[in-house]
Image (spheres, grey):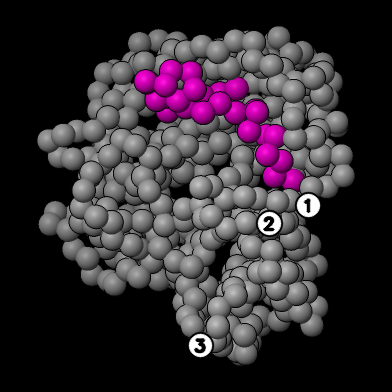
Amino acid sequence: MGTTLHQNAPPGLVQDLKVTVHNSSLVFPSQETEKKSMFLSNIDQVLNFDVQTVHFFSEHKDFPPQVITEKIKDTLEKLLVPYEFLAGRLKLNPEIGRLEIECCGSGAGFVEASSEYSLDEIGDLVYPNPGFSHLVCSTDMLKPDDRLLCILQVTTFKCGGFAMGITTNHATYDGISFKLFLENLAAVAADKPLATIPYHDRRLLAARSPPRVTFPHPELLKLPATNPGQLEPNPTVFQATNEDLVFKIFQLSPENISTLKERARSSDEKLKITSFNVVTAFIWRCKALSCDARNVVEKGSMILYAVDIRRRLNPPLPESYTGNAVLTAYATEYRKQLEEGPFSKIVGLVAEGARRMTDEYARSAIDWGGLYKGFPHGEVIISSWWRLGFAEVEYPWGKPRYSCPVVYHRKDIILFFPDILDDHDHDHVGRERKDGVNILLALPAEEMEKFETLFRKFLFG
């Protein structure tokens, strides 16, 4: 059974976007590419699932619907040359029991669609509308027996605006390298050279030989040794439950975040008080204390969150590295301390989790992955889209009105994502430091009620 979700949608939200698909096809690199196998790191290996994002654009007089559709299709064909792996296929190398990408030029997907609505009619773009799933295409929908690694769908609205829905297998790249892909898409669409030449050699994150696990890794869960490198989507410790869940968005304004930062300041001058650290600490506190367990304050809680390791390695990875270069950091504490202890200590625990991610710790985690084929494991994981900056990319037809993931809710995954900023804020030097954050979570009704109470108590109390 799947999870039942209930939502308090904002007024005017349209969930059936009345999307009609006019054409779906394979697109191929605009010139011949080399046939080869691409090595996937131990981080890539466990991320065999789809990630879907939608990027909304307002009408542009130079790019009416038919023009924009052909322009993006032509651009994708050109991008499949430097990003040749996107036209490839995942395969299992039976000799070593590992997944690889076969760069074979078999093609990416392209879908042309239209909606009967205008952008203004579909409601709040920030709200995780289930209807946004109509704006993307699953990688097994075009050819069920041939799972694509990338599908791009262009959906035009009756106002002349459009949505660019992109589905990629997570093994291809992480959010940071996806941002580079978007910047390159924008550059090629403007008939300019690549903004950044992608770096594809993922052996930079290969495990050591022999592997050396030099740290305990409570943030990772060993999986059974069966089905190594399986091609089916991997199981996850964050499976949907049979519980009835409600989901809500909580907002923290720039002023709220400033308040939390002031509250976190202590005599410890080394404490790294960032917006992410204080928001994560604040949400962890509320979530850990909202669960409906007896003697809950006597139990421990572990929170997980991603850390970019590009600059933490020695030597650092190239900035244009295209693979997955994030690992899971963790913080753990007894709930009694989360409830009664100083907020600065909780922020310190979150900061320490990231500080722990040194070159040796990251290498140890990568080696651990090769030995045990494990997954991140904790009570709750933060998935942050807050500062990835997808909406900051400048295309020939302008910056996105909004960019967001297509959300599939899980009780133990909390999403951070940005708000829509006014146009004049896009070029504001201090924008990244002053914007607020939206927090999405799904919980059973009783826990959600308690979470809301704790949210107000710890923010305003």
At x 77%, y 69%, the residue is 256
Q: Which residue is mark 2?
A: 246
Q: Which residue is mark 1?
A: 8
Q: What separation in Å lies between label 2 and label 3 (alpha carbons)? A: 27 Å
Give the residues in magenta.
127-153
Q: Earlier in the sequence, mark 2 or mark 3?
A: 2
Magenta stretch, main secondary structure, is loop
**Residue 83 % position (x, y):** 42, 26
Under mark 3, the amino acid is Glu
Q: Which residue is mark 3?
A: 298
Q: Earlier in the sequence, mark 1 or mark 3?
A: 1
Under mark 1, the amino acid is Asn
Q: What separation in Å lies between label 1 and label 2 (alpha carbons)? A: 8 Å
Under mark 2, the amino acid is Val
- To which quarter of the image does residue 32 belong? top left
Relative height, residue 142 to residue 432 (above, below)? above
